[in-house]
Amino acid sequence: MQNFTAVVEKCFETGLLVGYVPGLPGAHSQAETMEELRDNLSEVIEMLLEDGEPQFEAEFLGTQSIAVN
């Protein structure tokens, strides 16, 4: 079993949750709930893995909080 880190955002226009795996082309989806988004992303990643080992374009390192006055 492999684990992937997904970034989740909420679109203000549609109200949908949007998720993507940083650095993994094609690994993105949207949904109304976190559970549905997790299921959608899992399905997308499984399809990408059918083509062989994924080719990451970047490595997710984390997030950073930036304070601006």
Image (tube, rainbow, N blue to C red):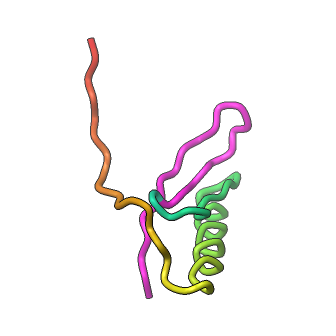
Q: 45 or 59, which lies in front?
A: 59
Q: Position of residue 56 (x, y in %)?
A: 44, 67
In the rendered view of the protein, which quadrant contains the N terminus?
A: bottom left
Magenta span dominant secondary structure: loop
Residue 48 shown left or right of residue 55 in the figure: right
Vertical placement of 12 versus 35: above or below?
A: above
Vertical placement of 2 versus 37: above or below?
A: below
Q: Position of residue 65 (x, y in %)?
A: 28, 35
- Please name the residue shown 60% across and 80% down the image: 46
Residue 39 shown left or right of residue 63 in the figure: right
- Please name the residue shown 64% across and 38% down the image: 11
Vertical placement of 42 versus 62: above or below?
A: below
- Please name the residue shown 57% across and 54% down the image: 19
> Which segment did they paint magenta?
1-21
In the rendered view of the protein, which quadrant contains the C terminus?
A: top left
Q: 49 or 64, which lies in front?
A: 49
Residue 31 shown left or right of residue 27 in the figure: right
Q: Position of residue 55 (x, y in %)?
A: 47, 73
Q: Position of residue 42 (x, y in %)?
A: 59, 73
Magenta stretch contains residue 7: yes
